[in-house]
Amino acid sequence: MDQRIIDLYDRFTHGQIGRREFMDRLATLAGSLAAAAAMLPLLQNDYARAAIVPEDDARLDIATEQYLSAGTPVTGTLVRARRVDAKRPAVLVIHENRGLNPHIKDVTRRLALEGYLAFGVDLLSPDGGTPADEDKAREMIAALDRPTTVARAVDAVRFLKAHTASTGNVGAVGFCWGGGLVNLLAEASPELKAGVAYYGAQPPLDRVPDIKAALLLQYAGLDARINEGIAAYEAALKAAGKDYTVHVYDGANHAFNNDTNPARYDPKAAELAWTRTGAFLAKHLGAPPPVEI
């Protein structure tokens, strides 16, 4: 697909242009409004493709759980392997700007099959939960108060640290908007041991000296919007003596890990990034117990 179209859709989904302007520009690039309408499903997520790990996988125990943040209930999907009595490291999974959708729930199940206590938080749950309408979800994400949202993520780390099935070692993995939140969480949470940010916006550089967690920063080579901040962020991390690793996946688009999006998904980059994520989490959280097949 034409890279200009992917970049245009990225600008739309991140609120830089409105729907009408997006469709007008897409029609120009596609050749007609009808061609633009036919192309739109290729740009959007197809959640029928989400279940790499089925929701009814017999190896997993899946439940909706909640914790309190400043007295407000926040819910999410907690997933762990069955038939394993040992405690395990915990991983907070932070969604994109579409909320806790089927793809992120599937990612949470994948981490559980790696042996982690995985919690896919729904940071829209205090406002009624993630809606099925992605445009509405993006609007809700854009309206969130950042300090309150960061505080809720900090409390999610505390929830996982204290969970009876947890070793007390907690990491976080976030994608897109959630990747940016991982960067903020690494500074805000004294209890987070490791953070993996997939193509996430960089935090204010004056906060970098306060980062406590080790960081794995994974970027897409074609993601100009996010990548313009890499050099300054890396320089600040290096100057502050932080534990960090940066990987840029050449030729990959923003959201390359999202296998429900045919226009963006890059299997080679996604597989390599996932392998690196697993090794990084095991190094900083401790290797999880094996999952019985």
Image: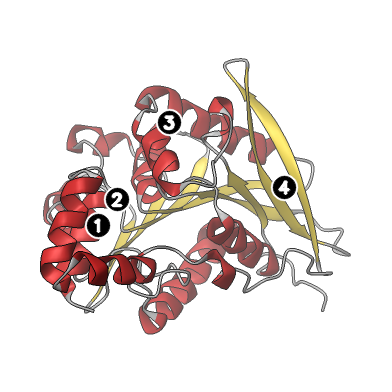
Residue 136: where, in percent of width, then height? 43, 39
The residue carrying mark 2 is 13
Report which residue position mark 4 lands on.
Answer: 166
Confirm or deny contact between disc 2 and disc 3 (CB under 8 A). Answer: no
Question: What's the residue type where badge 1 is placed?
Answer: Asp
Q: Do callouts 3 and 1 mark residues in contact (Cβ within 8 Å)?
A: no
Residue named by callout 3 = 150
Look at the image and tell me in which quarter the N terminus lies.
bottom left
**Looking at the image, which residue is at 36% across and 47% down?**
177
Report which quarter residue 73 is drawn in.
top right
**Mark 4 element type:** strand
Residue name at image x 31 percent, y 52 percent: 200
Q: CA distance from mark 1 to mark 4?
A: 37 Å
Distance of mark 3 from mark 1, alpha carbons? 24 Å
From the top left corner, tell me how far across and down residue 21 is, in percent: 16, 48
Is 34 left, or right, of 86 in this rendering?
left
Of the image marks 4 and 2, the number of the one nearer the N terminus:
2
Label 2 sits on a secondary structure element that is helix
Q: Is residue 223 visible?
A: no
Mark 1 vs 2: CB contact within 8 A = yes
Marked residue nearer the N-terminal end (3 or 4):
3
* Secondary element type, mark 1: helix
In the rendered image, which residue does mark 1 sit on?
10
> Which circle's residue, 2 or 3, is located before the other in the chain?
2
Mark 2 Cα shell of 10 Å, populated few (<14), some (14-19), many (≥20): many
What's under tag 2, amino acid-wise?
A: Thr
